[in-house]
Image (cartoon, rainbow, N blue to C red):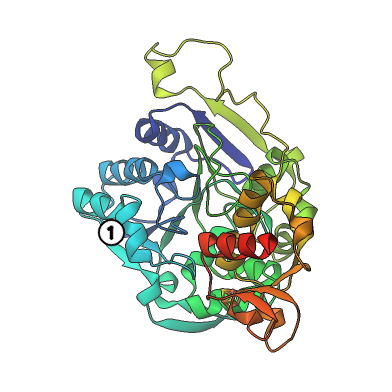
Amino acid sequence: MSINRNQIVQIYGTDYKENTILLLKETGLASLIPSVSSRIVIKPNLVSATEASWGATTHPEIVAGIIEYLLDNNYRDITIMEGSWVGGLTSDAFDVCGYRALSEEYDVPLVDLQKAEAVTRDCDGMELALCKPATEIDFLINVPVLKGHCQTRITCALKNLKGLIPNSEKRRFHSMGLHKPIAHLAAALKQDFIVVDHICGDLDFEDGGNPVVRNGIFAGRDPVLMDSLVCRMLHYKPDEVPYIPMAEKLGVGSADLDKAEIRIIESSRQRSGKESEGKTETDPACELPLSRKLVLVEDAVEEVDSCSACYGSLIPALSRLQEEGFLLSGLPDKICIGQGFRGKTGRLGVGDCTCCFDNYAPGCPPGENEIYQYLKQLINM
Ligand code: SF4
């Protein structure tokens, strides 16, 4: 028996691999896979080359649990695929995030989609470029991290598929306002099963830095429902993340949480009697914090179609300046960022797209530290 599309099952605890296996047994993943010869792809979130404890990338223990479960059920054609964000190399992320070691341990190949051939496909009325290997999958297991995002507010199941498109298309997504192409991508590339890493995602930034420890792992089949749940957990309405209703309209899934069945199962430690009862910091009953670092600083920014890596470097840099007591009001003007400023003039910009401005922090994308140093120097002047 496998879970239905309106069901989400959760597990909390620190034995990540064991808990993942329990979750997959409980949800009956194997009965959803068409045949033992199916080409199964596991798609983690390796946005950048940082360890999972930083709050940005998928814990390798979860992927190890998925692989062990699949091998135990006689599935042998398993691949891990990912394309990191424009600002970093997937090959570095494979090393730093522990996936190279995972690949060697289980003899599961890694596919770096930044090196893959691109193909163009009609994605439910929108033509998009996809990485060719991502179009040759029989069963896709999406393993996103539950995180906040400084442009789209949240990122989880739907947006994680952006790692399956070429870098040039990632930039184009931003020039198209992100939401619509994310929804169309989800309509074209069907995710068959979702395992959400809710261990310690950053609730503000896609690239981590402020991990919030929850030690949770969720499983489900409907990415729209999963993302709607994430919205509720992070104190947003699904409508505040436009790609969710857009994906629902395209038939990707349902955002109706009233019809969802969400339940928590016992962890491996609870089953073995090792975990004491009572409320802990990772108790699922604890609400996630409402505070949003980016709200504090986004007033200082004017953003038009910026890439995640660019904006994702600027906001933490501003946050650092603010924490150090630098008044962002001391800047000569709003900070402009994004492809929408290409060829335009202005006073203060970030990234090569603003190279015609009087002052700009160069780079495509510039790093967080470079932006921080540049702005600090400007404020001091
Ligand atoms: S400089 Fe422009 S193209 Fe380069 S990462 Fe930033 S927004 Fe994207």
Q: How many labels sit on residues?
A: 1
Query: Which residue is under mark 1?
Result: 77
349 is higher (above) or lower (below) than 8: below
Q: Is residue 41 visible?
A: yes
* Residue at 56% over, 36% down: 212
- State ligand 1's quadrant: bottom right
- Farthest residue, direction front: 381
- Farthest residue, direction bottom: 343
26, 161: nearer the viewer: 161
* Residue at 58% over, 67% down: 310
380, 309: nearer the viewer: 380
Quadrant housing the C terminus:
bottom right
* Residue at 46% over, 83% down: 119
* Residue at 75% over, 48% down: 296
Q: Is residue 123 visible?
A: no
Q: What amino acid type is highlighted by mark number 1?
A: Asp
188, 5: nearer the viewer: 188
Q: Position of residue 326 (x, y in %)?
A: 69, 51
In the picture provided, is 37 more to the left or to the right than 273? left
